[in-house]
Image (spheres, rainbow, N blue to C red):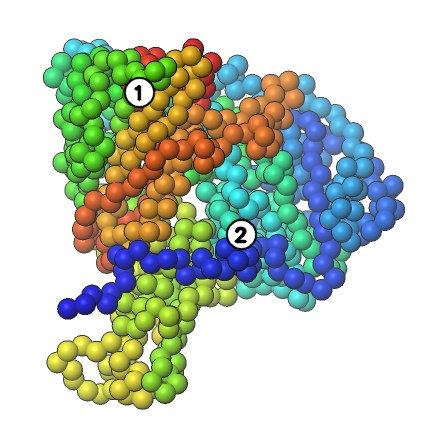
Amino acid sequence: MEDKNTIGKAITRIDGLLKVTGKANYATDYPAKEMAYAVLFKSTIAAGQITSINTADVKSLPGVLTVITHENAPKLNVKGGLRGGALLQGPEVYFYGQHIGIVVAETFEQATHAAKMVKVTYTPNTDAKIDFEKLAPGAVVPKGEELADHNRGDAKGAFNSAEVKFEGTYHTPIEHHHPMEPHSTVAVWEGDKVILYNGSQIINGAQNSAAATLNMKPEQVRIVSPFIGGGFGSKGGQWANLVLAAVAAKVASRPVKLALTRQQMFNSVGLRQQNFQKISIGAMRDGRLISLAHETTTHTAIEDEFIERCGEGAKIMYDVPNLLVKYRVVPMNVILPTYTRGPGHSTGSFALESAMDELAHQLEMDPIELRLKNQPDKDPSSGKPWSSRATITCLQEGAKAFGWEKRKKQPGQNKVGNDLIGYGVACGTYPARQRPSSATIKLTRTGNTVNAVVAIAASDLGTGTFTILTQTAADGLGMPLANVTVKLGDSDLPPAAGSVGSVGAASFANAVNDACEKITNELVYKSGKQFFVRPTAYQLMQSEQVTEFETRADAKAPANAGEYSSHSFNANFAEVRVNSLTGMVKVTRFLAVVGAGKILNPKTARSQIIGGNTWGIGMALSEESLIDPRWGNFATRSFADYHVPSNMDIGQMDAMFVNEKDSIVNKMGIKGIGEVGIVGVAAAVANAIFNATGKRVRDVPITPDKLL
C-alpha cells in the first residue's frame, strides 16, 4: 500500500522558488508611499559622556528631514525588554559604537552623508574597561541565581585522589552572528498604531518588547516578518534599531526604512562573548571518570548582564559522580553579549570535548571508547530518566560510516606528500523542548476541491518552517500538499513560540497537528455519523458538503514532560589535512550523526545540520572578532577581515539521523536540530588537528601561526 504521508520525506522547500527568483519579501522589501530613510550614527569612544552634538548644519543639508538625538528623542521605557540599551535616552556612552543619533532623509545616500557630518564632542572616561585579558583576574560572581556554582559531590577532593589527572584552559574569542540579511526595519504608522516590518525570530516577543519600550499596548504594534535571511540568535531578542525605526517614522511623519550596514552589525546586535574555560578531569586508569570541573571566566556589558552557560553540557554528558560548574564574569565597555547559535553548548563543548580527547591520549585509550565507557543511564544533573538518548548509537554508527578504524593512534603518523592527515571525534547535546503555541486551520470547499489555510505567528529563519508545517497539515488533514497554504510571520496571527533554542519545529508542528486533530473531530461530530474507519478532514468536507469550517488549537508540552530529561545528541567526525610546510588546515571530510527524534523533513534537516557544522568549522579555523584594546572598537569590521568559511574551505559534508523514537518529549516525538548542529564541531576539528600533527591548540581559531 502506498504511503501517502509526507512527514519524514525529503520534500523540496515550499518557499524555495520565491527565494531563488527574488520574489520573497524580506523586511526592507516592503513598499510604502513617501518612504524616508534613516541612518544611525554611533559613538566613537568606549565610555564617557556626550558633551555636545552639533546638528544645526546637518539639518540644512539637502533632503534631511530630521535629526534625532538624546536631546530631542521621545521618552522611551528603557526596561521594555529590548536588548543592549542604546535608545537615545541620555548622554552616557557605555561602549564604542553605541547608537547616539539618527538622521532621516529623503534618500539613503543623503541620510548616510548627513550622518557622517554630525559633529560630536565627548568627555571620555579614562578608565574604560575594554581589555578582557587584563580584567579577567578580577572577575566576579554573576548576579543570576541560575549561574551560581553547581556542585555534585566533591570535585576537588576526587580530583586529588584520581589515578590520572588532566587540567587545561581553553579560549574561545568573540564571534558575531552575521546573518546574510543584516538587521533592518520598515516602520509605518497608522494613527496610534505602528506596523514594523522586521526580521524577528520571536514574533510575539518582538511585538511585546517594542510595545513596552514605546509605552504602547501590544495590540497597537504589529510585527510582520514572513521571510528572514538568518539570525542565529541575534534576531531573537530584539535590539534598539527596531524601536528607533518607529521613533524616526513618528518624528518624520513618514514611513521610514532603517537598515544596518555590515559594519554597524558588529556593535549593534550583540555577539558571542569571549571565554576562558578551565577543565579539570580526574579518572581511574581504566578510563572511568570520577571528577570533572568546568570553570568559565567571561565578560558582559557594564549596564546589563548576559552569560552563555558553557558548563551545561558538562552537567549531563558523562557519568561522573563529582562535578563543579562555575562562572565568573567581568563587566566591560562592550555591547551586551547575547544568544548565538548553540549558546553555551557550542563554546562549552569545544573545551569539554577537547579535554576528553586529551585525557584519552593520556590514558592511551581510543577517544570513542573513553566516551562510551562514561555514558550515564539517566541525567546525572537531575536524576531524571532520559526521554531518549542516542549518544552511543551516534558514536557507533558514525564510527562505521566514517571509517574510524583507519585512524592512527599515535599523532603525526599519517602523511601523504606534505599533508599530515588526522581524524577527530567529539559529542554534543542541546535541550529538546516544546513551548506553548497556537494555530488556526480554515478549510474551504469549492466543488470537490478542498483547500486549507494554516495560520500561526511562527517565524521561518530560512530553516524550512513553511515546508514542515505544510507537510504536517497535509498529513493531519489527509489532503495534498498543494492544497495547503501556511501563513506565518505576523503578530496578528495566533501566538506562537519563537525560532530559538531549538523549540521551533516541536512547538509549531505540534500546534498545527493538534489543530488538524481538533478540526477532524469537530467535523466528525458535526456529521452526526459513526464511522468504522476514521475519515480525514479532507474527506469529511467533501462527503458532508461543508463549504467552510475553522478551528483553533492551543498546544503545549505533555503534562509529564517535566518528569524526564529531553535532549538532542550528536557525534561529530572530522578528517583534516594539515600542510606541514604552511600550517594551512583543510577539513576534507566531516560527518555529523544526530539523534533528534522524529525528522520531519530529512532534506531541510540535513541542510540545518550542515549549516551548523560549517559554522563550527569556522569557529575552529577562522572566526574571531578582535577589539582594539586602546579604543574599544572592533578591528574586524567586515567580511574582508572577519573570515567565515566559503565553499572552497569546506570539503565533503555528510549528515546522518539515527532512527530515534521519543514518545515522551512531545506528541509528535520531535526534538530540535538547529542548535545541536554546531555543538561539538570545533572540538572534532581541533582533535583531528592534534591527531594529524601532535600539536594541541586550545585557543581557537586554529590558524597556521599556531601550528608552525
Which label number is shown at residue 421?
Answer: 1
Quadrant in the picture for the N terminus:
bottom left
Please, what is the three-letter code of the amino acid marked with disc 2?
Answer: Gly
In percent of width and height, residue 66 lies at 79, 50
- Asked if the residues shown at circle 2 and circle 1 are in contact, with their CB atoms under 8 angstroms apart, the answer is no
707 or 500: nearer the eye?
Answer: 707
49 or 395: nearer the eye?
Answer: 395
Q: Residue 284: name its quadrant.
A: top left
In percent of width and height, residue 375 lies at 16, 31
Would residue 33 appear left or right of 421 to someone viewing this image?
right
Q: Is residue 401 above or below residue 82?
A: above
x 26%, y 56%: residue = 8
Q: Is residue 444 visible?
A: yes
620 or 184: nearer the eye?
Answer: 620
Q: CA distance from mark 2 to mark 1?
A: 42 Å
Q: Secondary structure at mark 1?
A: strand
In percent of width and height, residue 140 lies at 45, 22
Q: Secondary structure at mark 2?
A: loop
x 22%, y 87%: residue = 528
